[in-house]
């Protein structure tokens, strides 16, 4: 007998997918972005809209996994050295923003007549921005790796860390005695430290060995399962410790950022992250209580304006004082003026402790509307920049220490003997090079030598894109497997048409196939070795340099003509025969020096 809940589950899934398929293309078509489309879709199908979805609480834990996977992928993009360079933004700028914004907003709420505990909880709750919203907007604009994007992300990281002391603050405000709360805080700090160290140790010393074993099995689904296990397992560990689940996934990603599997993991996670992020934004839209919002509409609008204005002003001031340019300071203020998803956590804790729920419902409406307004604030900021004659782009972050911190100029596919020499030639000239290889052991050994080599399958678009194929000027296919190369060529031509394709041909027949594929350049390594060998032999036999150069040119020209001719025959379905044509007439003789 079928489970009676199964039809409900499938009906809810159909409703979510249908709403997304309708709302998101419309939102992108009118220029407001996918996030607004998800929010509006959630408002329409939610319990305060059409009522197609009744229980937001049952879906919200699944939706929050989208934020977890987002932070895991962000961790993969930041190695520990780069994160250490952000320490002043995380602990300096981030802490200053939380404290100053929290006290200012709490003071305003006290002035309008709210109780001091409620005002403090509301003020510091509104001081937290939305990691999901801000990061998604930065990535959509291509500004996440910019100077201001990295500073904004540093602030968001500190806000994720601050959720623990803020929750402790709620306990202190509602407790009868401070001593018990103090003891609880110290216990929480100890658990937090243990949980963080556990994630770091496991990620640093165990995960690379695990992925090496799985990669050697050539089972793609196992790599995917392991990636999800790492992201969700680290998130669960942090949740047990009372920390943000997203922070745990981020730490796990950081530990894998220098491994040779980062691009494959990012590509495997991407579809799940995108779908769950959309689900998260829809659940945020569903939580907007429309009757309460309409009843207190003007108060909520004023609250949104005050919160976003004060946060923006404080962010601009602090960014300016800590070294950002005027343009970057305004960009940070335009990216983080909204309240965030962790604000709901603080409000829920306060409500469960006995504070007035209706008041926090109104505050929650302010939070959601501030999220909805953020993309419009960003669009207004871009329009203002263009009107002032400035492009809405920013200087890149500090010069990276490694090639894998930037988009590669050349992507080398296959890091065997041939690919290694190619990469060495390119890197010797200071070019940005990233290499991928489907041999896990080879990739790991190269990484130990400090070379930018990652494990990855060149026949997968998502892996190539994660490795930087979209920005690469040239893609060098140095693999030995002709079938893999053929699939890669077809994929690159379709998905990355701007990149030039250079190929290694294994033999004459393969060279004919590459000529038919119209790649930009191909070379037979055995042919070149034979040319070099013959050139040196002629030199030892006493021929002049001019004659050797002439012979080499004639051999190359005849070889090229034969390949083009054979390629035409293959295209017509006719057989080809190997031919060797002499480059000199039979009567010619070579004078051998004695």
Image (cartoon, grey):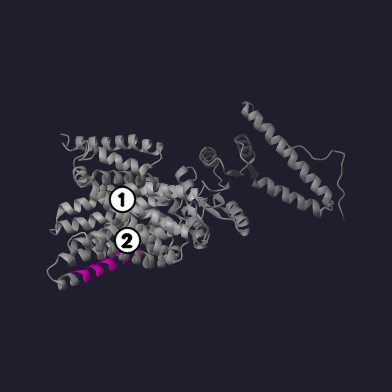
Going by the image, does 9 lie left or right of 266? left
Q: Is residue 444 left or right of residue 536?
A: left
Q: Which mark is residue 250?
A: none
In the picture of the structure, the residue carrying the numbered disc 2 is: 159
Q: Is residue 416 left or right of residue 153?
A: right
Quadrant where the C terminus sits is bottom right
The crowd level at tag 2 (other Cα within 10 Å; few <14, some 14-19, many 20+) is many
Based on the picture, tell me whether residue 311 belongs to the magenta stretch: no
Q: Is residue 578 above or below residue 378?
A: above
Instruction: Name the spot of residue 287 as percent of width and height, x first.
Output: 23, 46
* Residue 388 visible somewhere in the drawing: yes
Residue 157 drawn at (x, y percent): 35, 60
Magenta extent: 184-201
Residue shown at the point (82%, 40%) measured from the top left: 584
Q: Is residue 152 above or below residue 495?
A: below
Q: Give the side of residue 405 with respect to residue 157, left or right.
A: right
Q: Secondary structure at mark 2?
A: helix
Q: Position of residue 337 (x, y in %)?
A: 35, 55
Name which residue lies at 80% across and 49% down: 548
Q: Nearer the viewer, residue 96 or 431?
A: 96
Predominant secondary structure, magenta span = helix
* Residue 251 visible in the current orientation: no
Q: Secondary structure at mark 1?
A: helix
Q: Position of residue 576 (x, y in %)?
A: 66, 31
**Badge nearest the viewer, 2 or 1:** 1
- Disc 1 target residue: 370
Mark 2 and 1 residues: CB-CB less than 8 Å, in contact?
no
């Amino acid at each position: 007998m079928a489970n009676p809940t199964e039809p409900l589950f499938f009906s809810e899934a159909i409703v979510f997918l249908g709403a997304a398929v309708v709302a998101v293309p419309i939102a992108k078509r009118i220029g407001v972005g996918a996030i607004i489309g998800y929010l509006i879709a959630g408002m329409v199908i939610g319990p305060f809209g059409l009522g197609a979805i009744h229980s937001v609480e049952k879906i919200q834990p699944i939706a929050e996994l989208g934020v977890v996977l987002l932070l895991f992928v962000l961790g993969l993009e930041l190695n520990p050295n780069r994160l250490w360079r952000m320490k002043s933004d995380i602990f300096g700028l981030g802490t200053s923003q939380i404290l100053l914004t929290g006290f200012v907003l709490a003071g305003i709420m006290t002035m309008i007549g709210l109780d001091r505990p409620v005002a403090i909880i509301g003020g510091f709750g509104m001081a937290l921005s939305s990691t999901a919203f801000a990061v998604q907007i930065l990535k959509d604009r291509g500004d996440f790796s910019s100077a201001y994007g990295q500073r904004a992300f540093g602030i968001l990281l500190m806000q994720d860390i601050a959720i623990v002391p803020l929750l402790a603050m709620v306990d202190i405000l509602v407790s009868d005695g401070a001593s018990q709360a103090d003891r609880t805080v110290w216990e929480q700090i100890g658990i937090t430290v243990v949980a963080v160290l556990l994630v770091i140790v496991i990620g640093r010393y165990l995960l690379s060995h695990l992925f090496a074993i799985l990669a050697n099995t050539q089972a793609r689904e196992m790599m995917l399962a392991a990636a999800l296990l790492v992201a969700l397992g680290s998130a669960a560990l942090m949740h047990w410790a009372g920390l943000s689940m997203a922070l745990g996934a981020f730490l796990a990603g950081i530990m894998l950022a220098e491994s040779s599997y980062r691009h494959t993991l990012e590509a495997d996670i991407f579809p799940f992250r995108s779908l769950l992020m959309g689900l998260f934004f829809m659940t945020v839209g569903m939580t907007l209580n429309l009757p309460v919002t309409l009843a207190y509409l003007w108060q909520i609008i004023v609250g949104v304006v005050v919160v976003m204005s004060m946060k923006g002003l404080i962010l601009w001031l602090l960014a300016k004082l800590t070294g950002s340019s005027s343009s970057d300071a305004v960009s940070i203020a335009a990216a983080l003026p909204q309240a965030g998803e962790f604000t709901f956590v603080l409000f829920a804790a306060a409500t469960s402790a006995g504070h007035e729920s209706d008041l926090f419902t109104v505050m929650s409406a302010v939070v959601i509307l501030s999220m909805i307004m953020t993309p419009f604030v960003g669009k207004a900021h871009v329009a203002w920049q263009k009107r002032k004659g400035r492009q809405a782009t920013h200087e890149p972050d500090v010069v990276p220490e490694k090639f894998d911190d930037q988009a590669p100029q050349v992507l080398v596919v296959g890091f065997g003997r041939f690919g290694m020499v190619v990469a060495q030639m390119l890197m010797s000239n200071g070019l940005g090079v990233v290499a991928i290889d489907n041999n896990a052991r080879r990739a790991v050994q190269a990484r130990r030598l400090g070379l930018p080599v990652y494990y990855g399958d060149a026949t997968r678009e998502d892996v190539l894109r994660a490795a930087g194929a979209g920005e690469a000027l040239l893609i060098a296919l140095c693999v030995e497997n002709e079938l893999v190369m053929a699939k890669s060529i077809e994929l690159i031509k379709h998905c990355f048409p701007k990149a030039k394709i250079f190929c290694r041909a294994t033999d004459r027949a393969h060279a004919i196939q590459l000529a038919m594929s119209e790649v930009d350049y191909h070379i037979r390594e055995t042919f070149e070795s034979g040319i070099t060998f013959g050139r040196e032999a002629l030199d030892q036999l006493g021929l002049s340099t001019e004659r050797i150069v002439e012979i080499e040119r004639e051999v190359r020209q005849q070889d090229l003509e034969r390949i083009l001719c054979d390629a035409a025959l293959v295209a017509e379905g006719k057989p080809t025969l190997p031919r060797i044509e002499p480059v000199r007439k039979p009567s010619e003789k070579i004078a051998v020096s004695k």
